[in-house]
Image: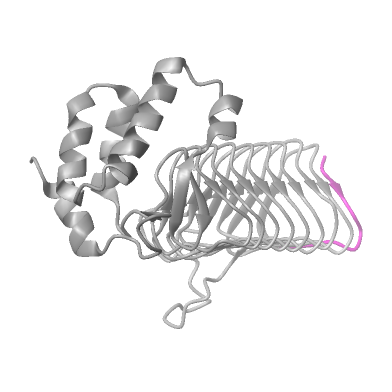
Amino acid sequence: MADVHTSAVLRGDVTLADDVVVGPGCVLDGTLGPVTVGAGSILVGQVFLTGPLTVGVGNMFYPGACIGFAPQSFDWDPSEPGTGTRIGDDNRFRECVVIHRATGSEAPTAIGSHVWFMNHSHAAHDVRVDDHVTIAGGVQLGGHVRVDQGATIGGNCGVHQFCRIGRGAMLSGGVPTTGDVAPFFMLTGFNTVSGPNVIGMRRQKLPADVLDDIRWTYKVIYRRRLPPPAALEALRERAGRPMVDEYIEFIEQSKRGLCRSANAGSRPQTQTETTALAADGR
């Protein structure tokens, strides 16, 4: 049987695994939709969870964490449950983390597994965060942002709505972005990429040929000073290599446009440029 403190409030449809710990002052509200918390999860105290919400195993929520509340959208009726929020396994949500449920009808706001949300960070509605992501204190993820596996977002970064942060990318602390950051690249200034994330690549123990493809791709996109269609065509010279194919797909799917290099100004590629880059060669 779950260990629920006498001061905690559980209402509506709430299901707890037998070894879940619910600390003092917590509120689990299943009146709009079910709240399910998996085995080994701990709510330290004064944690607020609202449904529809599914929490996997081994998660820890620190005081002030608020998960699953209504989106901060003028058009959203807070009495509507929507598709809710889904959280994977073995995540850490430090003090005052806020994650809002989805506005869409197809998929919930989704947090993967082994993700670290540090204090006062925020994921808005319809965000998707993949596994092994680190989100430092004060980070603000706008609605519909996507953060791919193994990315690191430094403290107090702001990520604009609909942006995508690629696998293994690194955003330096205090740097905002309104553009997409491609896999394993580093954002070191506003909309400014300065090079591959060498430390991140080493930590992931990528094979030498993959490291070569990442460095080569960076040079093609940012050092050759090619117009977007020509850059994508150059990348297709190595099509069939998994890492290069990942970059090609990332560019083709980009909604906000890739961030510029330090030598090309701070403006991300426009939607027109991104469309031209994605469409070239089809």
167 vs 1, nearest the viewer: 167
Q: Is residue 109 visible?
A: yes
**Residue 243 falls left or right of residue 129:** left
Q: Is residue 220 magenta?
A: no
Residue 234 appears left or right of 60:
left
Q: Which quarter of the image is occupied by the N terminus?
A: top right
Residue 65: image location, x then y, percent: 73, 61
* Residue 147 appears in the figure: no
Give x and y (percent) for residue 94. 76, 54
Placement of 5 over or under 205, stated as above or below: below
* Magenta part of the chain: 1-11
In this rendered view, identify the residue nearer to me: 79 or 140. 140
Above or below 76: residue 95: above
Q: How is the image coloured?
A: one colour
Q: Relative to residue 242, is residue 53 depicted above or below?
A: below
Residue ranking furthest to the top: 208
Q: Position of residue 35 (x, y in %)?
A: 63, 54
Depth check, front residue: 157 or 40: 157
Q: Is-magenta flag for residue 4?
A: yes
Residue found at x 49% / y 63%: 190
Classify the position of the C terminus by image quarter: top left
Q: Is residue 206 above or below residue 83?
A: above
Quarter of image, res 48: bottom right
Residue at (39% x, 59% y) in the render: 179
Where does residue 105 sit, x and y in percent of width and height?
36, 60
Between 276 and 46, which is closer to the camera in this rendering? 276
